[in-house]
Image (tube, rainbow, N blue to C red):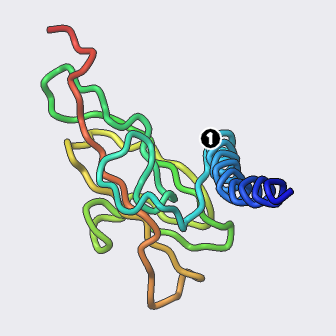
Amino acid sequence: MKSKPLKKRVVLAHIAPVLSVVTVGLLFLSLVITNHTPQSTLMGKVKYLSSRADSQLLVAFPNPIKVCDGSGVGDTTLSWNVPASTWYELHKGSQTGEVVVQGLGSGSEQVTRVANNAKYVLVGANSVAAQKKSQLGQVYVVHTRDGCAR
């Protein structure tokens, strides 16, 4: 008679971990389907990702850029996802570097002649006149020779 309550406890002990795995799986699936990740992820700061940045708001595609001509530069498209009311500035190199583009809300910009390991930084504020702008994201664009004729 005492074996039935033990089975119930064993089954109940496995429900929470199974639900956690299912929840994580559904979250991952939703991220893949929507191509969007929340700002608070467990991924931390990763310097090089093919199409994601450390804060998940700024991406470069393609990244890495295939450069086969020996020029040392290539082209990519930078895209960002911020609320429509957010004033943004996309800088080259650092938060105070050359402004590539600025405006309101999400968007994309093709950048040409991108050097290897080029850094782009997205900063934002609540308004154009805001004195304090905070970094929203950054991405490093890298080169590859993979797939080039030898």
The answer to which quarter of the image holds residue 54 is bottom left
Q: Going by the image, does 37 lie left or right of 115?
A: right
Front one among 70 and 138: 138
Q: How many numbered dots are placed on residues in this image?
A: 1
Quadrant (top left, top right, bottom left, bottom right) of the N terminus: bottom right
Which residue type carries mark 1? Val
Quadrant (top left, top right, bottom left, bottom right) of the C terminus: top left
Residue 91: image location, x then y, percent: 35, 64
Q: Going by the image, does 49 lie left or right of 105?
A: left
Residue 146, above or below 62: above
- Element assignment for label 1: helix
> Residue at image x 77%, y 53%?
7
What is the residue that sits farthest to the right in this orientation? 1
The answer to which quarter of the image holds residue 132 is bottom left
Residue 102: image location, x then y, percent: 49, 65
> Residue at image x 67%, y 73%?
85
Front one among 106 and 102: 106
Q: Residues within 10 Å of mark 1 (few under 14, many from 20)?
A: few
Residue 51: image location, x then y, percent: 44, 42
Residue 99, above or below 135: above
> Residue at image x 74%, y 55%?
15
> Residue at image x 23%, y 29%?
144
Q: Going by the image, does 12 lie left or right of 40?
A: right
Residue 66, above or below 40: above
Residue 28: image location, x then y, percent: 62, 46
What is the residue that sits farthest to the top in this orientation? 149
What is the residue that sits farthest to the bottom in this orientation? 131
Q: What residue does disc 1 label?
A: 32
